[in-house]
Amino acid sequence: MKAVRCCDKHIQVQEVARPAGDGVRVKVVSSGICGSDLHLINSGFTPPVTLGHEVAGILPDGRAVAIEPLAPCGHCDQCTTGNYHYCRLGGGMIHGVFREGGMAEEILVPERSIVTLPNNVSASDACLVEPLAVAMHGVRMLDLQPQSRVAVIGAGSVGLAVTAILTSHLQDVALTARHDAQKQAGERLGAKLECAGEYDVAVDCAGTSDSLAQTATLCKPGGIVLMLATYWDGVQLPTREMGMKNLRFYTSSLYGQQGLVKDVEVAAQLLANRPELPEILITHRLPLEAAVEAFAIAGDRKAGAIKVVLEP
């Protein structure tokens, strides 16, 4: 089958063997390109596996599903207490990073990774479940009230996913965006594009020293900063305002579950409740064979890309 891999910082569409072994076979329908994919490729850190962790497809029985791209061990101290996203395997449990991913015609995943979709959510759109779950995991840490004011810094796909979640429940959500397509998407999601006054919570989705400094400036005394970015190059913390305002900093990565409910399940329901999200967030759809072009588009935010999706 065809699959997308990286060799010496270059994207290639290769012929590989179909997946074999234990697990559930999924015929891939959509696979999104994540900002972390771009960072990994540019850094040269790309294990010899098929890329893609934002995946949805069809089961052999015809059911449309999304994939939670984690294969935790199930028996370490974290897994046995329900915190499988802290599994001691670390990155080794993530499909598309150290395990075979979903930028291919098929993927084989554990039964636990299958996310049943609501009837009105299609597999062609459900690759959005994963980035929405990333955002959901962070937002669920916060004790938000209907009157809470929240500012979101950075309008990539995760920043817009956070915005979609927040505007579903709050009246006062501000978003800072750099590019016109991001601004238009933010407005359509119901966010204000100007920050004014102080905020109860500021969410950093940009992942730089400057963006963290901006969150600290925007937070009210005693406010919360949610660090929902991946800080690839390290950052300088705004320690002066952190101390003077007694700010609380929360960090969030991946997704897990609260009680018996998984973040990916809540994310799938959000897609059902807000059917306009795919049209707003997915700006480009290309066939798997056009992966080189797709990655080039995804890396050029100025050209209007938000979420670029490969469709095998």
Image (tube, grey):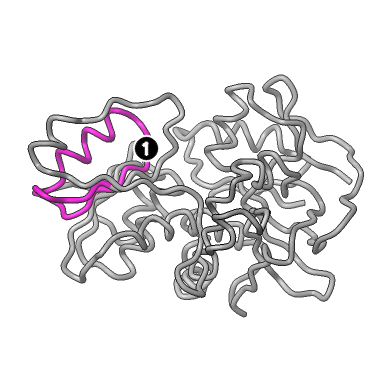
The verdict on residue 116 being magenta is no
Q: Is residue 31 above or below residue 58?
A: above
Residue at 12% over, 50% down: 222
Residue 262 lies left or right of residue 72; in this view the side is: left
Q: Is residue 34 above or below residue 209?
A: below
Amino acid residing under circle 1: Ala
Q: Which residues are magenta?
A: 197-225
Report x, y in % for residue 207: 37, 35
Residue at 22% over, 33% down: 213
Residue at 56% over, 55% down: 77
Which residue matches tag 1? 206
Secondary structure state at the residue bearing disc 1? loop
Residue nearest the viewer, comparing 201 with 246? 246
Residue 123 lies left or right of residue 14; in this view the side is: left
Residue nearest the viewer, comparing 1 with 233? 233
Can you tell which quarter of the image residue 238 is in? top left
Q: Is residue 236 above or below residue 303?
A: above
Q: Is residue 53 above or below residue 143?
A: above
